[in-house]
Image (cartoon, grey):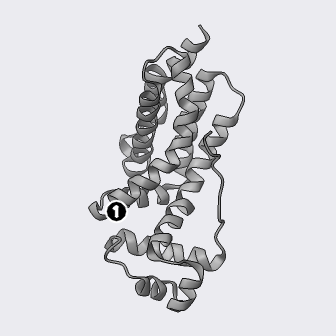
Amino acid sequence: MARNIKRRNIPTVRQEEILNAAAELFADKGYHGVSVDSIAKKAEISKGNLYWHFKSKQEIFHQLFEYLAGPLFEPLMQVMEDDLPPHDKLRALSRACFDTAESNPEVIRFGWQIAAQPELKEMFTSEYTEWMKPFIDRVAPIFAAAGEKNPEDIAKFFGLTLDAFMGMAVMMPEMFDKEATLAILDERFIQYGRREND
């Protein structure tokens, strides 16, 4: 069973300060270019105090991804829990993606910065895959019911397509037309939701 997406381990004010400092440093210098000392200095706390909140730099990165990804994934998973016809659910999910991206542009920008750094790619991919699994687990059955032979692959492609358009909405807004994009998604993916009911 797929896990529900919730804001787990909601950070304290001090932890938020540490995570925000780490986010800025990771985006600027990369993972290996940042030390625990530099994070502590940026957050204006002692190294010992930092270790009281986080055991390691790797834990900081993991918690940072969760801290930033939560606001993006929670609205999407809420749509998946709503009692809607399959095609309406896919359409609502697509719109929620773009609305969420527009409401959290700094998170999208940070994700793009991190994903572009070779040294962080493996860690980012691992975290991203973990967060995407519940999405795929809920969307794949819609494609399976429509007769798709590889529903998980279609669900992954749908998720990656949404992710790419979310990035475009924030990073290249002059090239992004929300309604036109939704029309394309409707033609390419949401049709499966209608087919399930045929």
**What amino acid type should be assigned to the residue bearing mark 1?**
Leu
Seen from this angle, which residue lies furthest top?
A: 198
Residue 29: x and y, percent?
A: 32, 74
Q: Percent from the top left, x then y, of residue 49?
A: 57, 88
Residue at 30% in and 62% down: 117
- Residue picked out by circle 1: 120
Count up the numbered dots. Answer: 1
Quadrant containing the N terminus is: top right
Q: Position of residue 100 (x, y in %)?
A: 56, 47
Apparent side of residue 191 relative to residue 29 in the rendered image (left or right): right
Foreground pick, 162 / 77 = 77
Q: Image point 45% across, 32% down: which residue? A: 158
Q: Is residue 49 above or below residue 152?
A: below
Q: Quadrant of residue 114?
A: bottom left
Mark 1 crowd level (few <14, some 14–19, many ≥20, 10 Å Cα): some
- In this rendering, the answer to whether 33 lies above or below 90 is below
Q: Residue furthest left?
A: 118
Q: Residue at x 44, y 71 (%)?
A: 58
Percent of width and height locating residue 67: 56, 63
State the residue lying farthest toward the front.
Answer: 1
Give the answer, above or below, for where 24 lies relative to 154: below
Secondary structure under tag 1 reads helix
Residue under the image location 67 percent in, 41 percent down: 78
Which quarter of the figure is the C terminus placed in?
top right
